[in-house]
Image (cartoon, rainbow, N blue to C red):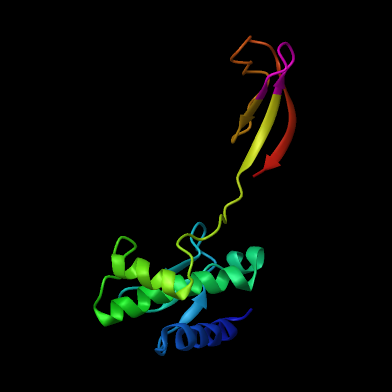
């Protein structure tokens, strides 16, 4: 999906779900890592994470668009636009937007096993098996695999 297609989609969703026009800029932003989208208070522009669309598809992207449009329309109307505000929660529920974006960051773990007690040890960072031993029995650790969660 290109930025022009995203702009058209945001304008369409704004008109259908909120019955108000979206008159600012919507674009993909590759620098977003952990969030699905972002509303800029000063410029009123919207940024969206392209990984969200690539990983979860258009259905989840539409839910995040509705979430950001809730911020947008409430802020322009001078009403409570923050996550904690009741008006925001009610509008989000009425339009069918998502409260939280799905998980975007993939966590990588390195799995080791102890030679003596067969205990599995998961670590985010690689261990030097010559230097570190099992915390349970002080046995030698062997690298098994790397997993992504």
> Where residue 40 sits: x, y (%)?
36, 73
Q: Residue at x 35, y 80 (%)?
A: 73
Note whether residue 99 is visible: yes
Q: Quadrant of the C terminus?
A: top right
Relative to 18, say whether 106 is above or below: above
Q: Is residue 12 left or right of residue 40?
A: right
Q: Quadrant of the N terminus?
A: bottom right
Q: Residue at x 55, y 74 (%)?
A: 62
Q: Nearer the viewer, residue 113 or 11?
A: 11
**Which quarter of the figure has residue 87?**
bottom left
The range drawn in magenta is 113-120
Relative to 6, say whether 148 is above or below: above
Q: Residue at x 34, y 62 (%)?
A: 83
**In the image, residue 116 lies in the stretch drawn in magenta:** yes
Q: Residue at x 50, y 56 (%)?
A: 34
Q: Nearer the viewer, residue 26 or 132?
A: 26
């Amino acid at each position: 999906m290109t930025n022009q297609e995203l702009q058209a989609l945001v304008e369409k969703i704004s008109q259908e779900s909120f019955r108000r026009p979206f008159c600012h800029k919507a674009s993909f932003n590759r620098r977003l890592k952990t969030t699905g989208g972002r509303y800029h208070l000063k410029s009123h522009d919207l940024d969206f994470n392209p990984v969200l669309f690539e990983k979860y598809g258009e259905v989840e992207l539409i839910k995040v668009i509705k979430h950001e449009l809730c911020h947008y329309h409430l802020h322009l109307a001078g009403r409570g636009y923050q996550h904690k505000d009741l008006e925001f929660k009610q509008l989000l529920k009425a339009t069918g937007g998502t409260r939280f974006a799905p998980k975007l960051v993939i966590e990588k773990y390195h799995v080791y096993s102890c030679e003596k007690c067969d205990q599995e040890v998961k670590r985010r960072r690689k261990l030097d098996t010559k230097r570190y031993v099992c915390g349970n029995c002080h046995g030698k650790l062997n690298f098994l695999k790397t997993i992504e969660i």
